[in-house]
Image (spheres, helix red, strand yellow):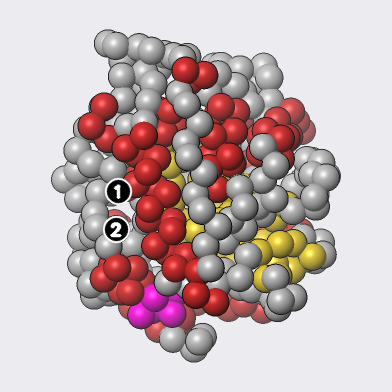
Amino acid sequence: PSPTPSPAPTPTPTGGPTATPIPTGTPVPTVTPAPTATPAPTATPTPTPAPTLPAGGLRPLHVAGNLLLDSAGQPVQIRGVNYAGAAFACIQGWGIFGGPTDLAMVQAITSWHANAVRLPLNEDCWLAINGSPAAYSGAVYRQAVINYVNLLNQNGVYAILDLHWNAPGTLQATGQQPMPDLDHAPTFWSQVAATFKGNDRVIFEPYNEPYPDGNRDTVAAWTCWRDGGTCSGVSFQAAGMQTLVDTIRGTGATNVIALGGIEYSNALGRWLAYKPTDPLNGLVAAWHVYNFNLCSNVACYDSTVGVVAAQVPVIATEIGVNNCDATQLNTVMNWLDAHRAGYAAWAWDTWGAACSSIALVLDYAGTPTTYGQVYKTHLAQFP
């Protein structure tokens, strides 16, 4: 998200090992090369596919028109949380998820009436490249993700997997980039899709928050978003959304694919015009909306996101406020409910009670922060 109309990018609030998120207004820091660079993702074996689970009543998902439906033809509204640590704990060398992934933790999430968890992932840690810490990377990282997704599904919770941190060449994935990198992102998605194909209780979100062309809403930005290649504001060859959709479908995966727009996934105004081709018609629009985004009022929601939601399903895979403004958050959620759109709040992580941390909980038993209580109260109206 970008807090001002300026082109200066602002990273999504993320957590660190000191339990402090980083929702600052500073640009993503320059990434430095790892001392033991090994940019060979093709040498990484494809993980063993996750089994198709009976998953106690949790039915697989597909797209029909502008609705997300389950296998019984019933509409599904995603109402979830982000669990952010798998984007950064591994590459920072201190863990995989940054917190628990046990049954009690999942039950705490479902006690809020949430039905989905979004897991931001790290490209280097999945692929075990560019000096990512061996203790937390490769097969260890992949199996941990598989196990947690299975546990979620078995307890009635959908999973959304997004590529959150990435980097080109031999650079380490220690932060956000303007676009997915052509060097590694297709390999990442070929492996993730091969791992979870056959389990359509998992939604794929190919890239967290694109912001090409200096974080501007331009034809150049949208062309880069769809087609990749050489792009303004991107210092490497980008993988466009069409390439990543093709990569996922090339594995045989039929999972729903959620594509976030530009300007940190906050701008959807030209999403329909630049929508990639999907032979399965399984695309949904992902949207991120915080109080500090450019599009953060109902007039903008109606004129841009509402137009998209009339054509394809919308899931706001990140929502939140950094000031505990209940009116702002409830306005967003009520708007999404009225448009039968899904959402996932940032974030089920224990980064402290301060509103600026954008953390939902004080502990993994689910004790809400002031901000989290607003979200918990809203979800209580649902089964």
Residue 250 vertical placement versus 151 (above, below)? above
Residue 220 appears left or right of 134: right
| The quadrant where residue 22 appears | top left
| The quadrant where residue 131 appears | top left
Q: Residues within 10 Å of mark 1 (few under 14, many from 20)?
A: many
Q: Residue at x 70, y 30 (%)?
A: 243
Q: Nearer the viewer, residue 174 or 282?
A: 282
Across and down, in percent, residue 206 comes to: 59, 41
Q: Residues within 10 Å of mark 2 (few under 14, many from 20)?
A: some
Secondary structure of the residue carrying tag 1 is loop
Q: Which disc, if any, is residue 129?
A: none
Q: Residue at x 29, y 58 (%)?
A: 101
Residue 56 vertical placement versus 217 (above, below)? below
Q: Nearer the viewer, mark 1 or mark 2?
A: 2
Across and down, in percent, residue 316 comes to: 57, 60
Q: Residue at x 47, y 65 (%)?
A: 153
Residue 87 appears left or right of 90: right
Gap in Å between the C-alphas at discs 1 and 2? 8 Å
Magenta span covers which residues? 110-115
The disc labelled 2 sits on which kind of residue? Thr
Residue 294 appears left or right of 268: left
Q: Does the segment drawn in magenta span residue 99? A: no
The disc labelled 1 sits on which kind of residue? Phe
Instruction: Name the residue that disc number 2 marks.
Output: 101
Across and down, in percent, residue 307 comes to: 78, 61
Instruction: Name the residue that disc number 1 marks.
Output: 97
Q: Label 2 near label 1: C-beta < 8 Å?
A: yes
Q: Residue furthest left?
A: 18
Q: Does the segment drawn in magenta span residue 112? A: yes
Residue 90 appears left or right of 81: left
